[in-house]
Image (cartoon, rainbow, N blue to C red):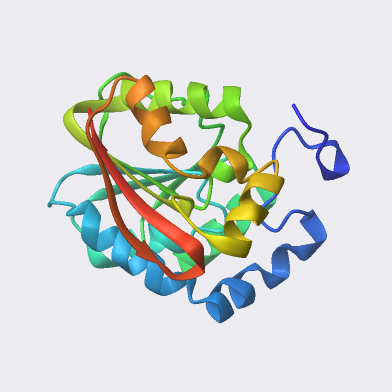
Amino acid sequence: MAHHPQDHDYVPAMGKDRLLPFYDLCTWLLGVGRIHRRLVELAAIEPGQRVLEIGCGPGGLVIRVQRTHPDAEVVGLDPDPLALAKARRKAARAGLTVRFDQGKAGDLPYPDESFDRVLSSFMLHHLDGEEKRRAMAEVRRVLRPGGQLHVVDVAGHHHGRFAHKMQRSELLRDNAGDGIPDLVREAGFTDVRTGERGRLHTTFYRATR
């Protein structure tokens, strides 16, 4: 695994712990909220369903899910205790009952077939190839039959300067082209779909357990 700042065995939400206070401002300026809103729409969450976000960071997406679907049971997982503390404070201020757990996508602390939806937003490109494969195997394990994985990330087919940038980036290279749908199929998912492209060179994906 690559060496990360401050000897973490994960990539902090903003790359470095000291930048975490600027996370919400940066995501707002980049329009990430609109991307999250679309991901929630595409996930088509139903009342009573259990929803997990892997790599939830400071909680922007899971808090949006809980606001939009108050009858769903929503869980956010992240390895970063500082990001989770920030997420818990935000959820408490909003009066929301999101559950936050510390852990990694490649070793999910949940029983088999315990979720209806798993969401991933701008997280997969933080993992190396082996970590991605472990994460997808774990996601498939915790999804119920018929459950869905919904992903948005800097990924997909791009041209010109940005395509070259993706190929040069250790973090983004695996996401280029059909990297994510190939990864998901390899984990045993079916009905793998590449959806629309969004802001920030993102692509949306869906797959069924």
**Viewed as shown, does residue 109 lie left or right of 190?**
right
Image-quadrant location for residue 189: top left
**Viewed as shown, does residue 178 lie left or right of 70?**
right
Image-quadrant location for residue 207: top left
x and y percent of residue 195 in the render? 27, 53
At 49% across and 63% down in the image, what residue appears? 201
x and y percent of residue 68 in the render? 25, 66
Give the answer, above or below, for where 97 lies relative to 134.
below
Q: Residue furthest right?
A: 6
**Quadrant where the C terminus lies?**
top left
Q: Residue furthest front?
A: 160
For residue 95, say whether it is visible.
no
Q: Residue furthest bottom?
A: 29
**Quadrant where the N terminus lies?**
top right
Image-quadrant location for residue 188: top left
Of 140 and 115, which appears nearest the observer?
140
At 28% across and 60% down in the image, what residue appears? 40
Give the answer, above or below, for where 139 lies relative to 195.
above
**Viewed as shown, does residue 185 lie left or right of 42?**
right
At 12% across and 52% down in the image, what residue appears? 47
Of 2 and 85, which appears nearest the observer?
2
Give the answer, above or below, for where 205 lies relative to 32.
above
**Viewed as shown, does residue 135 lie left or right of 191?**
right
Give the answer, above or below, for where 39 lies relative to 186.
below
